[in-house]
Amino acid sequence: MQPHLRELDAAKGRGIPQPDTQFLAQVNIKVNTFPIAFTIASSFKQKKMSTTTVKTKEPVHRMGNTQEPSRKVVFNISQNFKVLKIIGEGAYGIVAMAVHLPTNTKVAIKKIEPFERPLFCLRTLREIKMLQKFSSHENIIKLYDVQRPTNYNSFNEVYLIQEYMPGDLHQIIQTHTLSDQHVQFFIYQILKSLKLIHSANVIHRDLKPSNILVNENCDLKLCDFGLARLDSVGMRTNKISLLTEYVATRWYRAPEIMFNASHYSTAIDMWSVGCILFELLTYKAVFPGSDYINQLTLIFELLGTPSEEDLEVIKSKRAKVFIKSLPVRSKINFYSFCSNHPCRRIRHQNRDLEVNPLAIDLLEKLMVFDPSKRITAKEALKHPYMSNYHDPLDEPSTTPIPVEEFAFDIEKKDLNVEDLKRLIYDSIMSNKRHG
Protein backbone atom coordinates (compact mmCIF):
# COMPACT_ATOMS: atom_id res chain seq x y z
CA MET A 1 0.00 0.00 0.00
CA GLN A 2 1.32 3.41 -0.96
CA PRO A 3 1.95 5.69 2.04
CA HIS A 4 0.59 9.22 2.20
CA LEU A 5 1.96 12.40 3.73
CA ARG A 6 -1.04 12.55 6.06
CA GLU A 7 0.55 9.59 7.79
CA LEU A 8 3.75 11.58 8.03
CA ASP A 9 1.91 14.51 9.58
CA ALA A 10 0.27 12.23 12.13
CA ALA A 11 3.68 10.89 13.12
CA LYS A 12 5.43 14.26 13.12
CA GLY A 13 7.57 14.91 16.18
CA ARG A 14 6.88 17.93 18.36
CA GLY A 15 9.22 20.84 17.94
CA ILE A 16 10.32 19.91 14.41
CA PRO A 17 10.59 23.03 12.20
CA GLN A 18 8.03 23.41 9.45
CA PRO A 19 9.05 23.52 5.77
CA ASP A 20 9.21 26.74 3.79
CA THR A 21 6.73 25.52 1.18
CA GLN A 22 3.03 25.15 1.85
CA PHE A 23 2.62 21.74 0.32
CA LEU A 24 2.67 19.80 3.58
CA ALA A 25 -0.27 21.88 4.80
CA GLN A 26 -2.16 20.82 1.67
CA VAL A 27 -1.79 17.10 2.09
CA ASN A 28 -5.48 16.47 1.47
CA ILE A 29 -5.36 18.20 -1.90
CA LYS A 30 -4.56 16.11 -4.93
CA VAL A 31 -2.05 17.84 -7.20
CA ASN A 32 -3.66 18.42 -10.58
CA THR A 33 -2.21 16.39 -13.42
CA PHE A 34 -2.48 16.78 -17.16
CA PRO A 35 -5.26 14.65 -18.67
CA ILE A 36 -3.03 14.31 -21.73
CA ALA A 37 0.73 14.32 -21.39
CA PHE A 38 1.24 17.05 -23.99
CA THR A 39 -1.63 19.41 -23.18
CA ILE A 40 0.81 22.28 -22.80
CA ALA A 41 2.57 21.63 -26.06
CA SER A 42 -0.67 21.70 -28.04
CA SER A 43 -1.66 25.03 -26.47
CA PHE A 44 1.82 26.45 -26.64
CA LYS A 45 1.91 27.31 -30.32
CA GLN A 46 0.59 30.85 -30.03
CA LYS A 47 3.18 33.42 -31.00
CA LYS A 48 2.27 36.07 -28.46
CA MET A 49 4.76 36.40 -25.67
CA SER A 50 4.56 38.25 -22.39
CA THR A 51 7.12 39.51 -19.91
CA THR A 52 6.46 38.65 -16.28
CA THR A 53 8.50 40.10 -13.46
CA VAL A 54 8.45 38.35 -10.10
CA LYS A 55 10.25 39.14 -6.87
CA THR A 56 12.14 36.61 -4.84
CA LYS A 57 10.70 37.23 -1.38
CA GLU A 58 11.36 34.18 0.76
CA PRO A 59 14.29 31.75 1.07
CA VAL A 60 13.96 28.89 -1.38
CA HIS A 61 15.70 25.54 -1.33
CA ARG A 62 14.51 23.50 -4.30
CA MET A 63 17.86 23.51 -6.07
CA GLY A 64 19.99 23.12 -3.01
CA ASN A 65 20.73 26.76 -2.20
CA THR A 66 19.12 29.34 0.05
CA GLN A 67 18.33 32.48 -1.87
CA GLU A 68 19.74 35.89 -0.98
CA PRO A 69 17.60 39.03 -0.40
CA SER A 70 14.67 39.92 -2.66
CA ARG A 71 15.33 40.84 -6.28
CA LYS A 72 13.40 40.93 -9.54
CA VAL A 73 13.45 38.07 -12.03
CA VAL A 74 12.01 38.48 -15.54
CA PHE A 75 10.32 35.59 -17.36
CA ASN A 76 9.79 36.16 -21.10
CA ILE A 77 7.25 33.42 -21.68
CA SER A 78 4.08 32.56 -23.56
CA GLN A 79 0.90 34.35 -22.49
CA ASN A 80 -0.53 30.91 -21.75
CA PHE A 81 1.34 31.02 -18.44
CA LYS A 82 0.98 33.13 -15.33
CA VAL A 83 4.07 33.06 -13.12
CA LEU A 84 3.19 33.00 -9.42
CA LYS A 85 6.41 32.81 -7.41
CA ILE A 86 10.02 31.67 -7.38
CA ILE A 87 10.44 28.23 -5.78
CA GLY A 88 14.09 27.41 -6.47
CA GLU A 89 17.41 28.80 -7.59
CA GLY A 90 20.75 27.32 -8.54
CA ALA A 91 24.02 28.35 -10.14
CA TYR A 92 22.59 28.83 -13.60
CA GLY A 93 18.81 28.46 -13.34
CA ILE A 94 15.73 29.77 -11.55
CA VAL A 95 12.52 27.78 -11.09
CA ALA A 96 9.11 29.44 -10.79
CA MET A 97 5.71 28.01 -10.04
CA ALA A 98 3.23 29.04 -12.71
CA VAL A 99 -0.26 28.28 -13.94
CA HIS A 100 -0.99 27.05 -17.45
CA LEU A 101 -4.07 29.21 -18.03
CA PRO A 102 -5.84 27.11 -20.72
CA THR A 103 -5.96 24.13 -18.34
CA ASN A 104 -5.65 25.95 -14.98
CA THR A 105 -2.84 23.56 -14.10
CA LYS A 106 0.22 24.29 -12.00
CA VAL A 107 3.57 23.85 -13.72
CA ALA A 108 7.20 24.58 -12.91
CA ILE A 109 9.09 26.82 -15.32
CA LYS A 110 12.86 26.59 -15.20
CA LYS A 111 14.57 29.65 -16.62
CA ILE A 112 18.17 29.12 -17.69
CA GLU A 113 20.62 31.72 -18.99
CA PRO A 114 23.38 29.41 -20.18
CA PHE A 115 25.22 31.44 -22.78
CA GLU A 116 27.83 33.00 -20.52
CA ARG A 117 29.93 29.85 -20.10
CA PRO A 118 30.40 26.65 -22.13
CA LEU A 119 29.85 24.62 -18.94
CA PHE A 120 26.34 26.04 -18.48
CA CYS A 121 25.59 25.38 -22.16
CA LEU A 122 26.65 21.74 -21.79
CA ARG A 123 24.47 21.26 -18.73
CA THR A 124 21.48 22.81 -20.46
CA LEU A 125 21.91 20.67 -23.55
CA ARG A 126 22.27 17.51 -21.47
CA GLU A 127 19.20 18.29 -19.40
CA ILE A 128 17.02 18.94 -22.44
CA LYS A 129 18.16 15.79 -24.22
CA MET A 130 17.88 13.57 -21.13
CA LEU A 131 14.42 14.79 -20.21
CA GLN A 132 13.21 14.44 -23.79
CA LYS A 133 14.20 10.78 -23.54
CA PHE A 134 13.17 9.86 -20.01
CA SER A 135 10.37 12.14 -18.81
CA SER A 136 7.62 9.66 -19.71
CA HIS A 137 8.77 7.52 -16.76
CA GLU A 138 6.54 8.02 -13.72
CA ASN A 139 9.51 8.60 -11.41
CA ILE A 140 11.31 11.16 -13.57
CA ILE A 141 10.14 14.75 -13.76
CA LYS A 142 8.01 15.38 -16.85
CA LEU A 143 9.25 17.86 -19.42
CA TYR A 144 6.07 19.13 -21.04
CA ASP A 145 7.78 21.50 -23.42
CA VAL A 146 10.74 23.76 -24.06
CA GLN A 147 9.69 27.23 -25.15
CA ARG A 148 10.66 27.82 -28.74
CA PRO A 149 12.66 30.99 -29.32
CA THR A 150 11.29 33.51 -31.80
CA ASN A 151 14.53 33.37 -33.76
CA TYR A 152 18.17 32.46 -33.25
CA ASN A 153 19.46 36.03 -32.90
CA SER A 154 17.14 36.79 -29.96
CA PHE A 155 17.76 33.41 -28.31
CA ASN A 156 19.28 34.32 -24.93
CA GLU A 157 17.24 32.28 -22.45
CA VAL A 158 15.95 28.72 -22.19
CA TYR A 159 12.60 27.94 -20.55
CA LEU A 160 11.80 24.36 -19.55
CA ILE A 161 8.10 23.77 -18.83
CA GLN A 162 8.01 20.95 -16.32
CA GLU A 163 5.67 19.07 -14.06
CA TYR A 164 5.11 20.88 -10.76
CA MET A 165 6.05 19.03 -7.59
CA PRO A 166 5.42 20.84 -4.29
CA GLY A 167 8.43 19.65 -2.31
CA ASP A 168 11.56 17.53 -2.22
CA LEU A 169 13.03 14.71 -0.18
CA HIS A 170 15.34 17.08 1.69
CA GLN A 171 12.31 18.92 3.07
CA ILE A 172 10.61 15.66 4.01
CA ILE A 173 13.68 14.42 5.89
CA GLN A 174 14.05 17.76 7.69
CA THR A 175 10.43 18.01 8.83
CA HIS A 176 8.83 14.58 9.22
CA THR A 177 9.11 11.33 11.11
CA LEU A 178 9.33 8.52 8.58
CA SER A 179 7.91 5.04 8.96
CA ASP A 180 9.74 2.06 7.50
CA GLN A 181 7.02 1.90 4.84
CA HIS A 182 7.81 5.44 3.74
CA VAL A 183 11.52 4.67 3.51
CA GLN A 184 10.81 1.55 1.45
CA PHE A 185 8.54 3.42 -0.94
CA PHE A 186 10.93 6.33 -1.46
CA ILE A 187 13.92 4.06 -2.10
CA TYR A 188 11.86 1.83 -4.39
CA GLN A 189 10.90 4.76 -6.60
CA ILE A 190 14.49 6.03 -6.74
CA LEU A 191 15.72 2.57 -7.78
CA LYS A 192 12.96 2.29 -10.36
CA SER A 193 14.03 5.55 -12.03
CA LEU A 194 17.69 4.50 -11.92
CA LYS A 195 16.97 1.13 -13.49
CA LEU A 196 15.61 2.98 -16.53
CA ILE A 197 18.39 5.52 -16.98
CA HIS A 198 21.14 3.01 -16.18
CA SER A 199 19.76 0.63 -18.80
CA ALA A 200 20.27 3.50 -21.25
CA ASN A 201 23.89 3.73 -20.01
CA VAL A 202 23.23 7.09 -18.40
CA ILE A 203 24.67 8.17 -15.04
CA HIS A 204 22.74 10.89 -13.19
CA ARG A 205 25.87 11.99 -11.26
CA ASP A 206 24.08 14.35 -8.86
CA LEU A 207 21.72 12.27 -6.77
CA LYS A 208 20.82 13.97 -3.49
CA PRO A 209 17.60 14.58 -1.54
CA SER A 210 17.05 18.08 -2.96
CA ASN A 211 17.13 16.64 -6.52
CA ILE A 212 14.36 14.17 -5.68
CA LEU A 213 10.94 15.84 -5.80
CA VAL A 214 7.96 14.55 -3.80
CA ASN A 215 4.24 15.31 -3.63
CA GLU A 216 1.66 14.78 -0.88
CA ASN A 217 0.96 11.23 -2.08
CA CYS A 218 4.65 10.37 -1.65
CA ASP A 219 5.06 10.10 -5.42
CA LEU A 220 8.71 10.73 -6.20
CA LYS A 221 10.37 12.24 -9.26
CA LEU A 222 14.06 12.45 -10.13
CA CYS A 223 15.10 15.84 -11.54
CA ASP A 224 18.13 17.96 -12.49
CA PHE A 225 19.85 16.02 -15.27
CA GLY A 226 22.34 18.77 -16.11
CA LEU A 227 25.29 16.69 -14.89
CA ALA A 228 24.11 13.41 -16.42
CA ARG A 229 26.55 11.61 -18.71
CA LEU A 230 26.86 8.38 -20.63
CA ASP A 231 28.53 5.49 -18.79
CA SER A 232 31.81 4.89 -20.60
CA VAL A 233 32.24 1.50 -18.90
CA GLY A 234 28.83 0.32 -20.00
CA MET A 235 29.44 1.62 -23.51
CA ARG A 236 32.83 -0.15 -23.68
CA THR A 237 34.43 2.94 -25.09
CA ASN A 238 37.29 5.13 -23.98
CA LYS A 239 35.88 8.23 -25.61
CA ILE A 240 34.23 9.49 -22.45
CA SER A 241 36.72 9.42 -19.63
CA LEU A 242 38.06 11.44 -16.77
CA LEU A 243 35.78 13.59 -14.68
CA THR A 244 36.06 17.12 -16.05
CA GLU A 245 33.58 19.10 -14.00
CA TYR A 246 32.22 19.29 -10.48
CA VAL A 247 30.13 16.16 -10.09
CA ALA A 248 27.66 15.53 -7.30
CA THR A 249 27.40 17.35 -4.04
CA ARG A 250 30.42 16.21 -2.04
CA TRP A 251 28.38 14.55 0.69
CA TYR A 252 26.85 12.08 -1.78
CA ARG A 253 29.94 11.56 -3.91
CA ALA A 254 31.31 8.05 -4.40
CA PRO A 255 34.92 7.48 -3.27
CA GLU A 256 36.09 6.50 -6.76
CA ILE A 257 35.24 10.01 -7.97
CA MET A 258 37.37 11.59 -5.28
CA PHE A 259 40.25 9.30 -6.22
CA ASN A 260 40.03 10.51 -9.83
CA ALA A 261 39.21 7.14 -11.32
CA SER A 262 39.99 7.19 -15.04
CA HIS A 263 36.49 5.90 -15.66
CA TYR A 264 33.39 5.84 -13.53
CA SER A 265 30.11 4.02 -13.96
CA THR A 266 26.48 3.89 -12.88
CA ALA A 267 27.84 2.55 -9.57
CA ILE A 268 28.43 6.15 -8.44
CA ASP A 269 24.65 6.68 -8.43
CA MET A 270 24.20 3.58 -6.29
CA TRP A 271 26.63 4.97 -3.71
CA SER A 272 24.46 8.09 -3.59
CA VAL A 273 21.37 5.91 -3.04
CA GLY A 274 23.14 4.39 -0.04
CA CYS A 275 23.86 7.86 1.36
CA ILE A 276 20.19 8.80 0.88
CA LEU A 277 19.00 5.59 2.57
CA PHE A 278 21.26 6.34 5.53
CA GLU A 279 19.75 9.82 5.69
CA LEU A 280 16.17 8.53 5.56
CA LEU A 281 16.94 6.26 8.52
CA THR A 282 18.90 8.73 10.65
CA TYR A 283 17.55 12.15 9.48
CA LYS A 284 21.14 13.32 9.05
CA ALA A 285 23.57 13.31 6.14
CA VAL A 286 25.93 10.41 6.79
CA PHE A 287 29.11 11.93 5.30
CA PRO A 288 28.90 15.74 5.72
CA GLY A 289 32.51 16.34 4.74
CA SER A 290 33.85 19.87 5.00
CA ASP A 291 36.43 19.17 2.29
CA TYR A 292 37.89 16.35 0.20
CA ILE A 293 40.10 14.96 3.00
CA ASN A 294 37.41 15.20 5.66
CA GLN A 295 34.92 13.51 3.33
CA LEU A 296 37.16 10.47 2.86
CA THR A 297 37.96 10.37 6.57
CA LEU A 298 34.25 10.18 7.42
CA ILE A 299 33.75 7.38 4.88
CA PHE A 300 36.61 5.33 6.33
CA GLU A 301 35.38 5.93 9.89
CA LEU A 302 32.09 4.23 9.01
CA LEU A 303 33.15 1.66 6.41
CA GLY A 304 36.57 0.92 7.82
CA THR A 305 39.92 1.11 6.05
CA PRO A 306 39.77 -0.35 2.52
CA SER A 307 41.34 -3.78 2.11
CA GLU A 308 44.34 -4.38 -0.15
CA GLU A 309 41.93 -5.93 -2.65
CA ASP A 310 39.72 -2.84 -2.57
CA LEU A 311 42.75 -0.61 -3.08
CA GLU A 312 43.39 -2.32 -6.41
CA VAL A 313 40.60 -0.23 -7.96
CA ILE A 314 42.63 2.91 -7.22
CA LYS A 315 45.22 3.58 -9.90
CA SER A 316 46.72 6.68 -8.32
CA LYS A 317 49.83 5.87 -6.27
CA ARG A 318 49.45 9.13 -4.34
CA ALA A 319 45.88 8.19 -3.38
CA LYS A 320 47.03 4.78 -2.13
CA VAL A 321 49.80 6.37 -0.08
CA PHE A 322 47.27 8.79 1.42
CA ILE A 323 44.87 5.99 2.44
CA LYS A 324 47.66 3.95 3.99
CA SER A 325 48.79 6.99 5.98
CA LEU A 326 45.44 7.14 7.79
CA PRO A 327 44.78 5.27 11.05
CA VAL A 328 43.51 1.74 10.46
CA ARG A 329 39.82 1.58 11.28
CA SER A 330 37.29 -1.23 11.59
CA LYS A 331 33.86 -1.10 10.00
CA ILE A 332 31.08 0.22 12.25
CA ASN A 333 27.92 -1.85 12.71
CA PHE A 334 25.33 -0.19 10.45
CA TYR A 335 22.38 -1.47 12.49
CA SER A 336 23.65 0.02 15.74
CA PHE A 337 24.73 3.21 13.99
CA CYS A 338 21.24 3.82 12.55
CA SER A 339 19.09 2.54 15.42
CA ASN A 340 21.03 4.52 18.04
CA HIS A 341 21.61 7.66 16.00
CA PRO A 342 20.83 10.74 18.15
CA CYS A 343 18.80 12.40 15.39
CA ARG A 344 16.65 9.28 15.04
CA ARG A 345 16.12 9.24 18.82
CA ILE A 346 15.00 12.88 18.82
CA ARG A 347 12.69 12.54 15.81
CA HIS A 348 11.11 9.31 17.04
CA GLN A 349 11.01 10.57 20.64
CA ASN A 350 12.81 7.39 21.71
CA ARG A 351 10.06 5.18 20.27
CA ASP A 352 10.27 2.68 17.40
CA LEU A 353 14.01 3.23 17.10
CA GLU A 354 14.95 -0.18 15.73
CA VAL A 355 15.66 -0.14 12.01
CA ASN A 356 14.40 -2.87 9.69
CA PRO A 357 17.30 -5.35 9.34
CA LEU A 358 16.48 -5.67 5.63
CA ALA A 359 17.20 -1.95 5.19
CA ILE A 360 20.58 -2.52 6.80
CA ASP A 361 21.27 -5.47 4.52
CA LEU A 362 20.55 -3.30 1.48
CA LEU A 363 22.84 -0.60 2.90
CA GLU A 364 25.63 -3.16 3.22
CA LYS A 365 25.33 -3.87 -0.50
CA LEU A 366 25.19 -0.19 -1.49
CA MET A 367 28.01 1.18 0.66
CA VAL A 368 30.80 -0.86 -0.91
CA PHE A 369 34.18 0.72 -1.62
CA ASP A 370 34.82 -1.27 -4.82
CA PRO A 371 32.28 -0.03 -7.42
CA SER A 372 32.39 -3.34 -9.29
CA LYS A 373 31.01 -5.06 -6.16
CA ARG A 374 28.28 -2.49 -5.49
CA ILE A 375 24.71 -3.65 -6.04
CA THR A 376 23.01 -2.37 -9.23
CA ALA A 377 19.59 -0.72 -9.43
CA LYS A 378 18.15 -3.78 -11.14
CA GLU A 379 19.53 -6.06 -8.43
CA ALA A 380 18.44 -3.73 -5.62
CA LEU A 381 14.83 -3.80 -6.84
CA LYS A 382 14.88 -7.56 -6.22
CA HIS A 383 16.23 -7.13 -2.69
CA PRO A 384 13.88 -8.36 0.08
CA TYR A 385 13.60 -4.82 1.46
CA MET A 386 11.76 -3.88 -1.74
CA SER A 387 9.44 -6.91 -1.73
CA ASN A 388 6.32 -4.89 -0.81
CA TYR A 389 6.63 -2.87 -4.03
CA HIS A 390 8.78 -4.89 -6.44
CA ASP A 391 6.92 -5.64 -9.68
CA PRO A 392 9.12 -6.65 -12.65
CA LEU A 393 6.30 -5.78 -15.07
CA ASP A 394 6.23 -2.20 -13.79
CA GLU A 395 9.98 -1.54 -13.74
CA PRO A 396 10.88 -0.69 -17.33
CA SER A 397 14.29 -0.59 -18.93
CA THR A 398 15.33 0.68 -22.34
CA THR A 399 18.05 0.38 -24.96
CA PRO A 400 21.45 2.08 -24.59
CA ILE A 401 21.73 5.58 -26.00
CA PRO A 402 24.10 5.74 -28.98
CA VAL A 403 27.29 7.63 -28.16
CA GLU A 404 26.73 9.77 -31.25
CA GLU A 405 23.67 11.41 -29.66
CA PHE A 406 25.94 12.93 -27.04
CA ALA A 407 28.91 13.63 -29.29
CA PHE A 408 29.04 17.16 -27.87
CA ASP A 409 30.26 15.67 -24.57
CA ILE A 410 33.13 13.96 -26.38
CA GLU A 411 34.00 16.99 -28.49
CA LYS A 412 33.35 19.65 -25.84
CA LYS A 413 36.95 20.86 -25.76
CA ASP A 414 36.51 21.97 -29.36
CA LEU A 415 33.10 23.64 -28.85
CA ASN A 416 32.66 27.27 -27.84
CA VAL A 417 29.53 28.99 -26.51
CA GLU A 418 28.27 29.81 -30.01
CA ASP A 419 28.65 26.18 -31.13
CA LEU A 420 26.76 24.95 -28.10
CA LYS A 421 24.09 27.62 -28.45
CA ARG A 422 23.41 26.37 -31.97
CA LEU A 423 23.13 22.78 -30.69
CA ILE A 424 20.66 23.83 -27.98
CA TYR A 425 18.62 25.83 -30.48
CA ASP A 426 18.51 22.94 -32.95
CA SER A 427 17.55 20.50 -30.19
CA ILE A 428 14.60 22.68 -29.18
CA MET A 429 13.43 23.38 -32.73
CA SER A 430 13.75 19.80 -33.95
CA ASN A 431 11.85 18.22 -31.07
CA LYS A 432 8.53 16.87 -32.30
CA ARG A 433 5.60 18.90 -31.03
CA HIS A 434 2.37 17.23 -30.03
CA GLY A 435 -1.24 18.28 -30.30
Image (cartoon, rainbow, N blue to C red):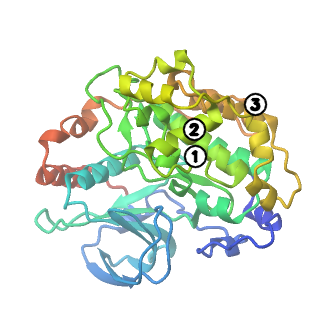
Q: Of helix, strand and loop, which one carries label 2?
A: helix
Which of the two marks, 3 or 2, is nearer to us in this view? 2
Task: Report the disc number at residue 77.
Answer: none
Q: Is residue 156 above or below residue 282?
A: below
Q: Say what amino acid the circle numbered 2 marks.
A: Ile
6 vs 266, left or right, is right
Decide: marks 1, 2 in contact (CB < 8 A)? yes
The answer to whether residue 57 shows anywhere in this view is: yes
Decide: marks 1, 3 in contact (CB < 8 A)? no
Q: Is residue 176 above or below residue 250?
A: below
Question: Considering depth in this image, is 353 or 397 the residue closer to the camera?
Answer: 353
Q: Of helix, strand and loop, which one carries label 3?
A: helix
Q: Which residue is mark 1?
A: 287
The answer to whether residue 1 shows anywhere in this view is: no
Point out residue 191 in the picture as x, y percentages from the top left corner: 59, 39
Question: Considering depth in this image, is 407 or 177 the residue closer to the camera?
Answer: 177
Q: Say what amino acid the circle numbered 3 marks.
A: Pro
Q: Is residue 396 above or below residue 353?
A: above
Residue in the image at 25% along x and 51% along y: 119
Q: Which residue is mark 2?
A: 299
**Pointer 3 or 2: first along the chain:** 2
